[in-house]
Image (cartoon, rainbow, N blue to C red):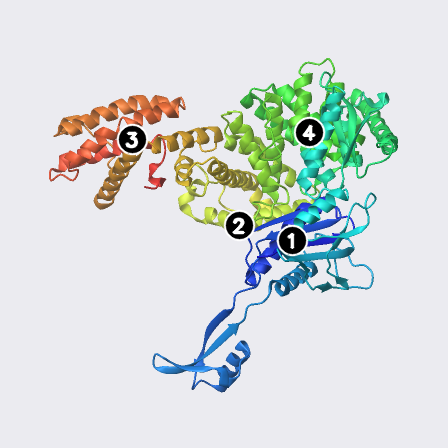
């Protein structure tokens, strides 16, 4: 069984594309070979800046012969059907067989495909792979039609076994496959022949090429750490940069330099970002001060002066870059010390969204909402409002203009300067840094109260604003990252163990402010918004106006969950319908739709935590489902309880009680919800259940009021045995009408008591 070696040798492949290209080469070739009838034992893919490599071991020498029988039309079928069958099979009429099939005679085609040698199949698959390779970007060069990420110079394609190695015959756009490759561009450019993968890898190393990207990463990291340690410094971890740099060099040579004294006063984040973005340098810090004092660069070759010239050139370029950063920093500090008023004024001219006003308008909404949220999360309202007013001002700074990824980080530095010596300075500055967090499922969640208040306000304003104007994100489309914002709100609340009512936050201020913003932009946008509102609620308002049953509903919109106080209007005209407070109607709709969206996000979140979907539904059906922390605790406790033997059996007892009670109420047309009296009990099991329910109610009701779900579940577990005994010994539908009614009312007590914890009708099993 031969081994296969493929190398596609080209000009430098962008580092960001190499990992995906390795995977694509492996998948396309192996899938193609398997589809053609070849198998293999193992496969490995590698990349350097100038080559993509695939090696397969244990490849079958040829594909197996295949015999296929294909049923055709009846022998008396129309000529057109027979002609079509002949074209599909590629046979002549005299090559078909006639066979009896049920009540008719039909044609059968016997197709035999002989086995094919591996070299022939490899050539076909590799040519198809090269011509259709899914590069994100590709180019043509010279006079050929082949497209590749960079000009492709050579193809190495070998099948090797104990008898030797053979080149697979292949020509792609004038490039003929061979058995040679080249080494390092500068240190060993001569081409050389190879016999197989082991020989190939060994000769590449002698030609100053590390084939495995993981090996290059490990070499860079270990050498950089050792050099930093030798100087009493620490290398700042940066996994993404390490992967990128390993994709830029074939023979990594690690060099370490020092940052000039003129730049050491810059914030470490500025130094690190500038060096990473512009120079692909790693940062080296002093562990005693936390200050960035050095850098690590990775050259692609060894030199006679051990990299001194390379390092000198890099330091010269770095000084120019850091001079720009210092200029930005010093100018920004002058604005910050003056209170950042210039930046605040500048944000009035920056549009956040054409339907939601400017960034300044948005900051005002966030500040008002942060002040409202602050008491709910234990934050000082004045500090939360001030933090929200300052948090986004760094968007106008020169530093964030150059490095957008530093927004928030620089906001903290500038806020510290603007508020120096004032109460709450540190908390407000930290909120400016943290209010974007969490940005993803693995991002840290802020815990300082002021930071939490502003972070919640920022995300909730985004959600309510776009809900008021666009509504749900549909399918996978989510251009404003609303799902990420919702997950951020969820994590901020749950991981900080906050008990807050999302409904009150949404309807109490966020949705109101968002709808007001959408209705108060330029006249054209306002007209579009009002038209959308009228169209959305026309049928609803018409039903409310014309249906008398709503006129007597003290809750206003009642069954349709809306509010109004006048019933005569022309709902085609905004001026007329505004009397119904249609904006308030939209606020309620936004709030309820947004809560539904949050419940969907919570389901995903809890399923990732291992909580069953039916347990989640049972908890969502309970009052207070806009308190996410309460929901999570209830779901966790219920799932843990249902995993126990008591929980499983109690669930069965509850379902039995509920089924009997529901059937009786449907049959009798009455509700059995009052009057269960122990004096009508005829058996010890009935009396025991009365006593157990009395004890359970005494324990469960206060436990639920205190949100002590563990205690409530423990009390529910005590009901399991009395309920089991009751159903074993007692016939509920007694011939005695008084006894029967008493027992049905007793079942209602079971249902009502358990329903305080969760809606177990939604739990499966």
Residue 426 drawn above or below residue 306: above
Closer to us: 466 or 311: 311
Badge 2 vs badge 1, beta-carbon distance below 8 Å = no
> Label 2 belongs to which residue?
538
Binning the other alpha carbons within 10 Å of mark 3 as few (below 14), some (14 to 19) or many (20 upward) gives some
Q: For mark 3, give the secondary structure.
A: helix
Q: Which tag is nearer the camera, tag 3 or tag 1?
A: 1
For marks 4 and 2, give the CA distance: 58 Å
Ranked by sequence position, the earlier of labels 2 and 3 is 2
Instruction: Give the label on residue 646, or none.
Output: 3
For marks 4 and 3, give the CA distance: 50 Å
Ranked by sequence position, the earlier of labels 3 and 1 is 1
Ranked by sequence position, the earlier of labels 1 and 4 is 1
Instruction: Give the label on residue 237, or none.
Output: 4
Binning the other alpha carbons within 10 Å of mark 2 as few (below 14), some (14 to 19) or many (20 upward) gives some
- Note whether residue 350 is visible: yes
Badge 2 vs badge 3, beta-carbon distance below 8 Å = no
For marks 2 and 3, give the CA distance: 52 Å
Instruction: Give the label on residue 229, or none.
Output: none
Q: For mark 4, give the secondary structure.
A: loop
Q: Residue 582: horizontal and vertical position, in percent?
A: 55, 42
Residue at image point 39% right, 83% down: 105
Q: For mark 1, give the secondary structure.
A: helix
Q: Residue 710: horizontal and vertical position, in percent?
A: 37, 24
Judged left or right of residue 430, residue 298 is: right
Closer to us: 745 or 116: 116
Q: Residue 443: horizontal and vertical position, in percent?
A: 60, 31
Ranked by sequence position, the earlier of labels 4 and 2 is 4
């Amino acid at each position: 069984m031969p081994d296969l070696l493929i190398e596609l040798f080209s000009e430098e492949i962008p580092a960001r594309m190499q990992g995906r290209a390795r995977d694509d080469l492996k998948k396309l070739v192996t899938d193609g070979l398997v589809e053609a009838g070849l198998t293999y034992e193992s496969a490995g893919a590698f990349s350097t800046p100038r080559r993509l490599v695939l090696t397969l071991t244990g490849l079958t020498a040829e594909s197996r012969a295949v015999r296929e029988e294909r049923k055709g039309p009846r022998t008396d079928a129309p000529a057109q059907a027979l002609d079509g069958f002949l074209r599909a099979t590629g046979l002549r009429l005299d090559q078909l067989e006639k066979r009896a099939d049920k009540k008719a005679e039909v044609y059968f085609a016997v197709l035999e495909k002989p086995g094919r040698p591996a070299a022939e199949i490899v050539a076909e698959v590799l040519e198809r792979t090269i011509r259709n390779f899914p590069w994100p970007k590709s180019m043509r060069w010279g006079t050929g039609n082949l497209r590749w990420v960079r000009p492709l110079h050579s193809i190495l394609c070998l099948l090797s076994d104990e008898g030797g190695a053979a080149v697979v015959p292949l020509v792609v756009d004038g490039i003929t496959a061979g058995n040679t490759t080249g080494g390092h561009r500068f240190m060993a450019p001569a081409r050389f022949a190879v016999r197989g993968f082991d020989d190939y890898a060994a000769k590449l190393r002698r030609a100053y090429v590390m084939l495995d990207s993981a090996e290059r990463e490990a070499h860079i990291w270990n050498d950089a750490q050792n050099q930093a340690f030798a100087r009493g410094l620490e290398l700042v971890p940066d996994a993404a940069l390490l992967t990128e740099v390993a994709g830029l060099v074939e023979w990594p040579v690690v060099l370490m330099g020092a940052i000039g004294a003129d730049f050491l006063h810059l914030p470490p984040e500025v130094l690190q970002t500038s060096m990473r973005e512009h120079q692909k340098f790693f940062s080296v810090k002093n562990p005693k001060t936390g200050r960035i004092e050095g850098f690590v660069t990775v050259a692609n070759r060894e030199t006679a002066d051990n990299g001194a010239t390379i390092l000198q050139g890099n330091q010269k370029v770095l000084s120019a870059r850091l001079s720009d950063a210092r200029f930005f920093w010093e100018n920004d500090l002058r604005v910050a010390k003056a209170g950042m008023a210039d930046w605040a004024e500048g944000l009035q001219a920056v549009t956040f969204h054409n339907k939601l006003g400017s960034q300044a308008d948005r900051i005002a909404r966030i500040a008002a909402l942060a002040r409202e949220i602050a008491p709910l999360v234990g934050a000082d309202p004045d500090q939360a409002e001030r933090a929200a007013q300052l948090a986004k001002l760094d968007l106008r700074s020169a530093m964030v203009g150059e490095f957008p990824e530093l927004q928030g980080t620089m906001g903290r530095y500038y806020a510290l300067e603007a508020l120096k010596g004032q109460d709450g300075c540190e908390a407000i500055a930290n909120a400016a840094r943290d209010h974007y967090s969490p940005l993803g499922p693995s991002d840290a969640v802020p815990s300082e109260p002021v930071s939490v208040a502003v972070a919640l306000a920022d995300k909730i304003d985004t959600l309510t604003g776009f809900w008021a104007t666009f509504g749900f994100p549909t399918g996978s489309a989510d251009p404003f990252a609303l799902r990420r914002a919702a997950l951020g709100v969820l994590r901020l609340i749950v991981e900080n163990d906050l008990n807050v009512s999302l409904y009150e936050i949404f309807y109490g201020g966020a949705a109101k402010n968002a709808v007001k913003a959408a209705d108060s932009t330029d006249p054209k946008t306002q007209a579009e918004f009002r038209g959308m509102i009228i169209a959305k609620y026309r049928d609803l308002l018409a039903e409310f106006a014309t249906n008398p049953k709503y006129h007597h509903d003290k809750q206003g919109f009642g069954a349709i969950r809306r509010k109004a106080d006048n019933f005569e209007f022309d709902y085609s005209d905004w001026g007329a319908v505004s009397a119904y407070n249609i904006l308030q109607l939209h606020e309620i709709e936004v709030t309820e739709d947004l809560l539904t969206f949050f419940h969907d996000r919570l389901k995903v979140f809890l399923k990732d935590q291992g909580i069953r979907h039916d347990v989640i539904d049972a908890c969502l059906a309970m009052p207070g489902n806009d308190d996410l922390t309460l929901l999570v605790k209830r779901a966790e406790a219920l799932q843990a309880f249902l995993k126990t033997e008591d929980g499983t059996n109690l669930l069965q007892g509850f379902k039995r009680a509920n089924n009997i009670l529901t059937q009786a109420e449907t049959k009798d047309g009455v509700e059995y919800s009052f009057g269960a009296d122990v004096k009508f009990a005829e058996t010890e099991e009935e009396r025991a259940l009365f006593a157990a329910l009395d004890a359970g109610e005494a324990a469960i009701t206060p436990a639920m009021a205190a949100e002590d779900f563990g205690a409530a579940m423990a009390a529910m577990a005590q009901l399991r045995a009395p309920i089991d005994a009751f159903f074993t010994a007692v016939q509920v539908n007694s011939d005695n009408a008084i006894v029967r009614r008493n027992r049905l009312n007793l079942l209602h007590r079971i249902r009502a008591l358990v329903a305080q914890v969760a809606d177990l009708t939604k739990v499966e099993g």
